[in-house]
Amino acid sequence: MRKNPMMNVKNASTFAKDKQKYSIKDTWGKLLKYCKPYLVAIIIALTCVIGGKILAILAPDKLSDMTAEISVGLSGNMNFDAILNIALILVLFYAGSIVLTYVESLIMAILAQKVSKKMRTDISKKINKLPLKYYDNHNIGDTLSRVTNDVDTIGQTLSQSIGMLVSSVVLFLGSLTMMFITNWILAVVAICATLIGFFAMALVMSRSQKYFTAQQEYLGKLNGHIEETYAGHNVIKAYNAEDKMNKQFDEYNGKLYTCAWKSQFLSGLMMPFMSFIGNFGYVAVCVAGAILTLNGVIGFEVIVAFMIYIRLFTQPLSQIAQAFSSLQQTTAASYRVFEFLSEEEIEDETSKNVRLSTTSGNIDFKNVKFGYNSEKTIINDFSISIKSGQKVAIVGPTGAGKTTMVNLLMRFYEIDGGQILIDGVPIKDLSRENVHNLFCMVLQDTWLFEGSIKDNIKFNNPNITDEEIVKACKAVGVHHFIQTLANGYDTILNEEANISVGQKQLLTIARAMIQNAPMLILDEATSSVDTRTEILIQKAMDKLMQGRTSIIIAHRLSTIKNADLILVMKDGDIIESGNHKELLKQKGFYAELYNSQFEEN
Amino acid sequence: MIKLLKYLKTKEWLLVALCAVFIFAQVWLDLKIPDYMQEITVLVQTEGSLMADVWHAGLMMMLCALGSLVTAIVVCFIGAKISATISFRLKKAVYDKVESFSMEEINKFSTSSLITRSTNDITQVQLFTFLAMQVLIKAPILAIWAVFKIADKGWEWSLATISAVCLLVIILVIVMAFAIPKFKKMQRLTDNINKVTRENLTGVRVVRAFNAESYQEQKFEKANEELTNTQLFTGKLMAVLLPAMTLIMDGLMLAIYWIGAFLIDSASQIDKLTIFADMIVYTSYAMQIVMAFMMLIMVFMIMPRASVSANRINEVLNTKPNIVDGTYDSSNNDIRGEIEFKNVSFKYPDADEYILENVSFKVEKGETVAFIGSTVSGKSTLINLIPRFYDATDGVVLIDGVNVKDYNQKDLHNKIGYVAQKAVIFSGSISSNINFGENDKGEMTAQDIEKSANIAQASSFIESMPGKYDSNIAQSGTNLSGGQKQRLAIARAIARNPEILVFDDSFSALDYKTDKVLREELNRQTKDITKVIVAQRIGTIIDADKIVVLDSGKIVGVGKHSELIEKCEVYKEIALSQLSKEELENA
């Protein structure tokens, strides 16, 4: 199936932009490496193409022999034996050509799938090997399009374009040679006629590029506008902003209309032009051939052969052009795939032999320094000692570095200076997997995947029993709600599922609780749960976490009031610490924050 | 698909008719070329032909080819215009329709599905229209005409051609019968790959925290395997197509020559030359016929996809919005800023359980009323009934003494400044986000904008931005923090200078202090405006004139904080979950 031409243009234009950045040789070298296991198959396939096309080129020659035989029969007796012989040879030629073409397309189709599959697998594995830093600077849509669109483009090129390119080149050169062998005058006529046609076409096509670019641009703008309008539907209605939004929409839509029909028109011209070039060459060959025949230079059968050659000759030219543009897209697509695959990975930790299978829960931050990028330090000099079994809360305004502390503790990011120790062991010496096993963690954004509630709670631990799941759900108070669903614990969670953010948070808490790890991290885990439910969860947690260290980040101060230690952070530093009562007594930042809810006017 | 054709006007239908005429001309010209070819063949084979005759025939052929090119360009032009027009009109129609929808219809389709329907689906229809204009009209004309032209040249040849076409159709139908379901499946599997990858990407922290990398990779491998297998199947199947086409074309050509040899042999001497010329030309016609059928089949191949898109578009266009404008003329009403709910109940269509049951209360001008309750108590639903995002299932909602259903929606919305739970920010600038929509009170001045930003506690961050009020805002406000977006949305509502301000949990991303200062400013500067607040925090609503406590869709308490803390058990529980006893007493 042919790809949408608009998409091609988009790829082509991004390609132009990226051009300077990468070498084509490099990219294709890497792509070849991927194909290496199938090298023999590729060579066989390409040999097939060449063989098949040579047979296809020789066929007209035989056909012209046949014409010659038949035209002999015009004035005398038909030599059926000779004709039958030629026909049989032709059948062999055609059959051979077809079998070879089929073998080639089959091999390339299979190869393309195998290579695409390997690429997708590699990308998927790579996703989990990249440092989180990578995701701070790259959006999800971009990575997604590498897995699907880019790999698809590569697959399509492998299965179609390479074969097409080789066969077109063979066809082109072969028919050129055959034309010259058959009759050089007609050959020159045919080439000239074709060139004139192509020149005219090139002129038209070179003008179409700007409309394609413009179309892509306005399509993007219009789609963005539509997304915005639909997403903000409520607000637009409530503010009577329909007219303003409509005006903008009409403007984009109108501009898109103009570029759309122009680019559609110009790209649609390709086909008529191609057939004109074919016809033009055909006419030129007929006329020139007739003149030559009348002068007795050639026989009529030469014209018949040329009528086919001219088709064989013009057809590959457009295919070569097409194949080149798709190779160009593939270079861009492969570059994007390989760029992703060659991103720096987190260090390999198989050599680390220190292991903490359990912990008493002492955590120490010693002069920790960190910034998400080298220009801006977020955490300046952070030191704190958390004792076994303590419930520690971190509060502070947005941007103070609360979540950063968790990121560092989980080793999602590497610190720039200082040390973080668990039970006296620097976490740098532990493998990430080991560190993660020590904590159960609940994040603010409720991440659930499409699957049943049961599977979501089990997640990657198949040993969890149904009883344990029910127990955890009861503890966080979501059991009753699950029971009211038609399929209970087997209800599939997806976009349409009617469950609130608060309920999702409860499910993620249940998922974390069931892991039963020695330490707990809650990062705004209950922000969408109402305060009464939150208290129930806290009670369940407290029971579960008795004697275990827990770290809680919360915006709502009521959530953390009963923590053993509250750390008030501002601009990457701890500015106050103590329990709720002590902090209120200090009458500092925390007290001000807390009391602001009671102040009289 | 056909239903969408009504979006073409008379002018376009005339163009379509014109297009058909040109296609007719094109086919005529295309089929004329082999005629001249035949003439040349005869000339060449006849002794003593004149050069001038050959030149003449050649010139005519050339003219036909040129004419064919010109007509093709015209056809292409009309096709491009019409397909772009259909796309233009459909986009507008769907967009307008969606704008007229209430939340109920939006939720029914889901926003992301509506976006796809307004963009990709329409593009599909556009591409198909263009192709159909070229092929659907041309192919049958070409096929039928060519068949008529050659029918009398020898039934043996015709039989060969018909067999070839039949074979072609059979092969394609068989291949497609197997391939199309797989293509549909492939789309689903590609979506699946996308979904699994997206899941892994969005949940990258959770996946790592749970050491679930290999779990996710296995899931991906499964999806990958499925997709690859399906693609392998279709790939192998499609690999048959090209050789099969070549086989048919080459075979037909050979058959025509083979038959020709016999026909010539058995013909009388005078006819031999004519038959020979016919044979040469016949191959050319036969190819045209086969090509025409191939094109037709290709169109039928992509038709299912386009028709699925067309149906999805029609679904949107045929949906009638539930909420329609009333006819009440509000210009003579002197009551301002009054809200009354009378026995209001609400449930979603198809749902069994009521979200709100028998809710009644009244708010006077300038009062602040707050709603509090647990996550599923129905607070948000309740205030969504005020700007009529939904209609109450039973009971009436009165604004300024008039049923909201009687208002023209524009008039109703002019009375209200609404701030959503999740701040909605539009691309543009700070000013364009504050000065948003129309309020029927004339243009907003820069001072108005700054004043509202000031009340909303947004001035400080706006002033610190490089372009101040003209600073660029990205789509969805991705360059602002949650708290900043919320303050901007609040400023927008204040700038509207409405009779009623509605805050749907709009202070949640603000810290206590900002929350406090903002509400104080609000009370000071907008005394006459009625305020409706939904909140989680007791602190946010503690000094409201009236607090309505909701539990499972029912009102369980109405009053001031001091009254409720004594009388209302639910309220007390909520309060105690946030503040200690002493704190509550001190407050």
Image: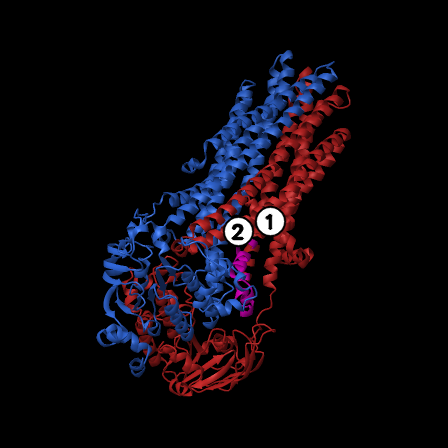
What percent of the width, then of the height, locates residue A28?
A: 66, 55
Q: Which mark is residue A221?
A: 2
Left or right: where B65 falls relative to B549? right
Q: Chain of mark 2?
A: A
Q: Is residue A162 visible?
A: no
Q: Colour of chain B?
A: blue
What percent of the width, then of the height, locates residue B499?
A: 35, 59
Cβ atoms under marks 1 and 2 closer than 8 Å: no
At a point 50% along the width and 70% down the height, the residue shown is B460
Q: Which mark is residue A157?
A: 1
Q: Which chain is red?
A: A
Kindly report the secondary structure that dominates the magenta region of the rendered protein: helix
Give the magenta-colored segment's residue range. Answer: A123-150
Left or right: where B574 falls relative to B48? left
In which quarter of the view is residue B355 placed? Answer: bottom left
Q: CA distance from mark 1 to mark 2?
A: 30 Å
| Front-most of residues A159 and A587 | A587
